[in-house]
Image: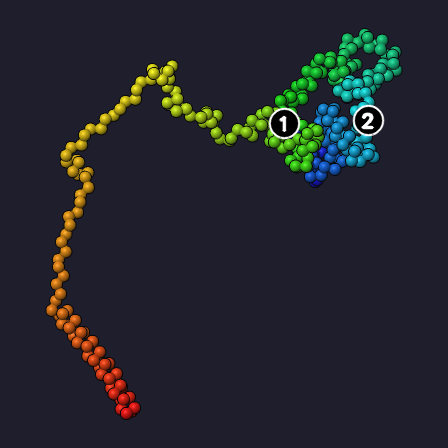
Amino acid sequence: MSQLEDAVAAAEAGDKNKAYVILAALLKTEPNNVDAWVALSQIVDDEKQKRTFLTRALTLKSDHARAASLLHQLDSPPAPEVVEDLPLEAESDDVDMAELEPEEEVAEPAAEVESDPLPEVIAPAVDTAPDDTVLMPAAEVAALRQQIEPEPTDTVVDARPISGNAEDFESQATGDTIPPWLMGEDGAIIPEAEALESMLEPEGVDSAELEPEVPDWLREELADSWEDEPAPEIVEDEPLSTREIASVAPTTPKASKKPASKRSKKQLDRMFSWLILVFVLVGEIALYFLLQVVTELNLLG
């Protein structure tokens, strides 16, 4: 079944809230569904809303016969309530006519019936029920109707479709649609002030916790002038003892004497051997150059 068929079935079953929710969801996805607008006009009780929804349907499809007929019925004067509220009146009229016809035909034996000690047998017990129903006063009919019909509740079901589209704010401003935050879970409209208060108030936070904490020094009563204020108490530190001063004073490290470095005999021998090696190398180099010079002089001489 489609959503439209589900809504019609729910409306025929008497569950208008369910039918409204289904049609609102359908119109949110299909705003140009003419049949949905017509069905929505049959669910609401407000004549102004009926006219608005039917006009919307005719705007989308001007030749829609069902919408034009329903709108014409709204414009025409209402029919007498007696015919609509008491559908048994026609049956009661038929019963009265049926009772009158045999009385006219059996006019002669009526005299014999007068002598009968039991005249109540003539009126059948079945015919008394419609007669009693027809002859009931209007006050009793209204009382019975209140017992049969459910008691009205404070829940107000708005037939306007729910829309959260950003481009639909203009329709929400004119009243054609309503934002989702104004619609409760049961399909009832939440007052705007209550909805705004619930949106602004954080969830799970007590109102007492939101109050700022006042420090103790702000709660104290102040003097009229600063001269009347008591002087603050000055706490003097106790003098330290000699032992405590000695423990706190920094300790200066004592200078340590470095022992004179004494070269061992082995180190001296090693240095002496290095010096001899250096002199030998220098002497060999000098002797080499001297031999070179002598050789060149001999060659030249």
> Residue, x 18% and y 30% (percent of image)?
239
Query: Are discs 2 and 1 less than 8 Å apart at CB?
Result: no
Q: Residues within 10 Å of mark 1 (few under 14, many from 20)?
A: some
Residue nearest the observer in this picture, 283 or 225: 283
Which residue in the structure is indicated by mark 1? Answer: 189
User: Closest to the observer: 124 or 49?
Assistant: 49
Displayed quadrant of residue 44: top right
The mark found on residue 138 in the picture is: none
**Vertical position of residue 212 compared to residue 64: above or below:** above
Mark 2 falls on what kind of element? helix
Residue found at x 17% / y 35%? 244
Is residue 249 rendered to the left or right of residue 11? left
- Quadrant (top left, top right, bottom left, bottom right) of the C terminus: bottom left
Amino acid carrying label 1: it is Ile
Work out which residue is located at the far front of the displayed protein and give it. 301
Q: Seen from this angle, which residue lies furthest left?
A: 265
**Visible residue check, residue 95:** no
Q: Residue at x 61, y 31 (%)?
A: 181
Circle 2 residues within 10 Å: few <14, some 14–19, many ≥20: few
Q: Position of residue 34 (x, y in %)?
A: 76, 36
Name the N-terminal-most of marks 2 and 1.
Answer: 2
- Tell us which disc is closer to us: 2 or 1: 1
Name which residue lies at 79% across and 18% down.
Answer: 80
Q: Amino acid at mark 2?
A: His
**CA gap, disc 2 to disc 1?**
30 Å
Q: Which residue is more in the foreground, 118 or 235? A: 235
Return the x and y of residue 200 as percentages of the image width and height.
Answer: 55, 29
Task: Mark yes or no: residue 184 visible.
Answer: yes
Disc 1, SS: loop
Image coordinates for residue 85, horizontal then vertical, percent: 75, 20
Quarter-of-image position of residue 190: top right
Circle 2 residue: 72
